[in-house]
Amino acid sequence: MSKLSTKHLLGIKNITVDDINLILSTAQNFKEVINRPIKKVPSLRDVTIANIFFENSTRTKLSFELAEKRLSADVINFSASQSSVKKGETLVDTVKNILAMKVDMVVMRHPNPGACVYLADRVDCSIVNAGDGAHEHPTQALLDAFSLHEKLGSLKDKKILIVGDILHSRVALSNIFCLQKLGAEVAVCGPSTLIPKHIEELNVKVFLNLKKALQWCDVVNMLRIQLERQDIQYFPTIREYTMQYGLSRELLKSIDREDMIIMHPGPINRGVEITSDLADGNSAIILNQVENGVAIRMAILYLLAGSMKSNT
Amino acid sequence: MDNRLLLNHESLSHMLDRLAYQVYERHLDLSKMALLSLQPRGVELGRRILERLKTMYNSDDIRYGEIDITFYRDDFRRREEMLVPSATNLDFSLEGLDIILIDDVLYTGRTVRSGLDAMLDYGRPSNVELLVLIDRRFSRELPVQPDYTGRVVDVVSEETVKVIWSEDDKKNEVQLFSPSPKA
């Protein structure tokens, strides 16, 4: 198996375990590339990629752009705030106009769930989902799996806990799909107002008490409270949230698990979901996740480009 | 497919000895030399040459690396099947060294071209030579010639030359596969 089963990366839900394993093993090669003195390979020198961001992003956008440049692709960037979207252009028209300039792939972030799927049905190019609303964020899930794989080896039967704002989190959903496909057990923990209804149907355990949840898991993935997505108040105060669902060294010490692997997709709200000393501590792999993000995105772009035949 | 034995284990083994001696003869100063095998097929050959050179120089300090060229190929997006990359194992800079690039069969020259590109990402060598076990002359698409050759063979493009390394290193051989004549 050396080819992805799909032309796009729209979400983790619709890709196979073989696809995930192929992406992870290819990323291993790219991780070696980005640690060389010259961190660039010529593979995509005849490919043009458009990064279309209808929503703010720092890490993901930089990571994609770096991945594209390290593969020698030509890159154009587009953000909705400075574009004709403000003048009333539709999504499909915007993208078709960009493609008319001979662009081969589109990396898109959009505030609406399903925007990438909608687009993939209507335009003729490879689309990579860089986050669509509260739906999926496949590259984040893959880089999380890759980072965990580096630490733990096979993820089969490993127990992974996701804590925080599960309701508004695309990272949580993609992570659940990805980790389960790799054989891990997943649980979520947070205030009941931030746990989506029926999430148990995805075979996910639900904890409302953080201490109990931490006793269950091997790894904890802390999410940020997405205040910008909250239309109503889901908990009384940030302080109360921190007291109940914030991760601190004292809490880990109380269950004798100070060495627990801690992940965070960023951006961190220090002192809210996690204390500074833990975020900067030895068991946090937050910066490894960021480094691996570039390798994973290189692997995805390389594999998708490989399944696209050249026009020459 | 019909197959024919080009080299048996014994003659292959003598050939490896000779290639190693030729390298030894030209590179008496070990401090400037490094062997670099092209993944995946050059590795088995490279490791065997390395073992022989260790005995000749009576030293374990021979620089040896393996380099993957998948991301440097010029047929990416032009072939049906994608190639799976192999690992690059190279923990020294190539700056100022005399490099001996190693691959098993030299055919079109495109793999070596990619190898030269990949190599330059690790520094600027002062000199690069090419060592191959089998040189399929008359099949070249790029101006690439070996400096050390095991055997030159004249075969047509429908035929395949395969170097087969046995696991226990006791029955290595080179075979020529030809398409069966149509009935």
Image (spheres, coloured by chain):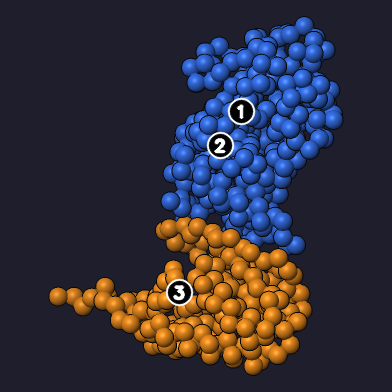
Q: What is the quadrant of residue A277 in the picture?
A: top right
Which residue lies under the disc numbered 2?
A: A155
Q: Callout 1: helix, strand or loop?
A: strand
Q: Callout 3: helix, strand or loop?
A: loop
- Residue, x 50% and y 21% (percent of image)? A203
Residues at discs 1 and 2 in contact (Cβ within 8 Å): yes
| Left or right: A57 as drawn, with respect to A109 | right
Q: Chain ID for label 2?
A: A
Badge 3 amino acid: Asp
Task: Determine the CA span between mark 2 and mark 3.
Answer: 36 Å
Chain A shown in which color?
blue
x, y percent for residue A104: 55, 49
Task: Determine the CA span between mark 3 and mark 1.
Answer: 45 Å
A58 over A188 or under it: above or below = below
- Residue, x 26% and y 76% (percent of image)? B2
x, y percent for residue B98: 70, 82
Chain B shown in which color?
orange
Which residue lies under the disc numbered 3?
A: B169
